[in-house]
Image (cartoon, helix red, strand yellow):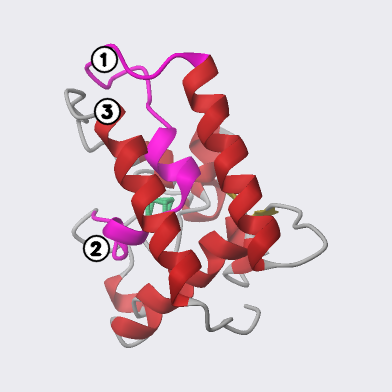
Amino acid sequence: MGGTINDEALVGELRALYARIDAHYADWTCPSSTECCRFGVTGRQPYVTSIEIAMVERAIARRGGMPSAKKHALPLTNDPRRERICPLLNRDNRCSIYADRPFGCRTFFCDRATQGEGPTRAVLQEHVNELRALAERHKLGGDAPRPLMRVLGRE
Ligand code: SF4
């Protein structure tokens, strides 16, 4: 992963943005299937900007590092490599950095989630734009979102 940039104010702004995003999903429930953290199952993974990476790095540092291999989530099938499990998903099938998880993890809902109203596309796009603006301030000159697994050194 890249180095941590010391700008608490921007991380604070991101936290406030996440709180606004989470509020849209307050009445949604999740069956905790953990499929969304198994990128080989969904065929998708979150792409993260520099400011999101900064928050993830802080969260990993606070918990004393990545979950050890022994504490990783177990595969659902007998082919763990195909599941491509996020290394931050722990053996209890919980995200080990839940409060600091990236935007894509907050807004991905599988078909099995009980759906409340949720944000409109336009509102979600506004939040995406806010996130991009934050990332540009965090990394001057622009910021290209990168796949989470690559950021975590897993591909
Ligand atoms: S960061 Fe957390 S919520 Fe996001 S994919 Fe990994 S384990 Fe799942």
Dot 3 or dot 2, earlier in sequence: 3
Q: What residue is at 64 percent from the left and 57 percent from the top?
A: 135
Q: Position of residue 68 (x, y in %)?
A: 35, 80
The amino acid on which the numbered mark 3 sits, given as a three-letter code, is Tyr
Q: Position of residue 121 (x, y in %)?
A: 52, 16
Span of residues in magenta: 94-121
Furthest-right residue in view? 141
Q: Which amino acid, mark 1? A: Gln
Position of 111 with respect to 29 (left or right) is right
From the image, tell me which residue sits under label 1: 115
Res. 91 mark:
2
> With 9 as the anchor, is 152 left or right in this view?
right
Task: Give the overall secondary structure of the magenta segment.
Answer: loop
| Residue at screen point 44% across, 14% down | 120
Q: Is mark 2 within 8 Å of ligand 1?
A: no
Lower position in the chain sequence, tag 3 or tag 1: 3
